[in-house]
Image (tube, grey):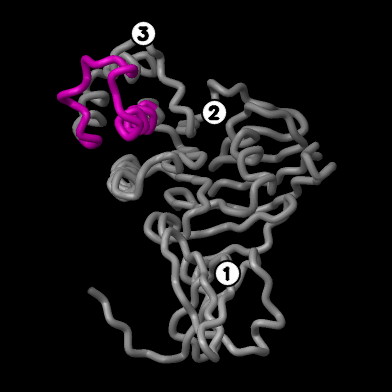
Amino acid sequence: MINIKINKTLHGANGDMNLDVVFDIKEGDFVALSGKSGSGKTTLLRILAGLEESNAVISVGDTIWQDKNTNLAVQKRSIGFAFQDYALFDNMTIEKNLLFVANDKKLAEKLLNITELTELKERYPSRLSGGQKQRVSIARALMKRPKILLLDEPLSALDSTMRTKLQSEILTLHKEFQTTTIMVSHDPSEMYRLANRVIILENGKIINDGSPKKVLLKTKGSQKFSFEGELLEIKKVDVIFIAIVAIGQQLVEIVISQDEVKNLQVGDRVNVSTKAFHPIIN
């Protein structure tokens, strides 16, 4: 069991905020951490890793990582990192980037094989695509077989096809190495696909914590479908009103009533739902 209790005052653009969280994680879990920007997600990861000071109590199994008397150094915490900026050594090949962390050629070969990078192992980072760099970053994070793998939106800069591919690889590595993974993400499909638990932060507090289905599915009562989006436009066509809503990467048109028009403004976050249940999937 991993026990986490963190208290730290954060100084953000909207003033001071207290990051105050208490939760436990079962070893081997895949936890998705989400919430609005500035809610404390990245700071929480940095505190776990020992990169940022705080009034925290952190224990992993029988080992105290941090309390009022103990504060293990970063290199003594069994943590693997993979962040958005990759942080690779430009003067080293892919293989040497991995071996720099731990001189274990057999493990490096295994990770390169899982991430389909074996044929590229002699290349330098400058000759890699964004998706390839991210695979190297994740593989390198696992070179010490960490107890905890921290992923801070590692796939946010990638296109949807590459994201899906790397999500599968991350899940494979998570299971293969039996690590506990904590990943910051804003993508509901990514969280649903990878995590067995989702924690939502808001203003430094946990406001929701549960299974992906419980936390992420937005249907209520007899609703069959429910999507959140942004209202882009309301237009009148003959005698009806049509709302244009952006849902993810898609734009949809929805017929609305005159009463609904009065309560809506362009820019609103809206929830689009239906009780009809006759889906067509092509």
Q: Is 197 drawn above or below residue 58 in the view shown?
A: below
Task: Find residue 230 and report its image quarter.
Answer: bottom right
Give how far apart the Cα atoms at labels 1 and 2 are.
Answer: 51 Å
Q: Which mark is residue 77?
A: 2
Q: Position of residue 102 (x, y in %)?
A: 36, 18
Q: What element carries label 1?
A: strand
Q: Is 33 drawn above or below residue 75 in the view shown?
A: below
Quick check: marks 1 and 2 in contact, CB under 8 Å? no
Residue type of the residue flagged with mark 1: Glu
Question: Mark 2: few, some, or many residues within 10 Å (few <14, many ≥20)?
Answer: some
Q: Which badge, 1 or 2, comes first in the chain's sequence?
A: 2
Number of numbered tags placed on the structure image: 3
Residues in magenta? 114-140
Q: Position of residue 183 (x, y in %)?
A: 49, 46
Q: Nearer the viewer, residue 186 or 183?
A: 186
Q: Position of residue 17 (x, y in %)?
A: 81, 45
Q: Residue 233 carries which label?
A: 1
Residue type of the residue flagged with mark 3: Asn
Residue displayed at 78% across by 40% down: 13
Q: Is mark 2 on a helix, strand or loop?
A: loop
Residue type of the residue flagged with mark 2: Arg
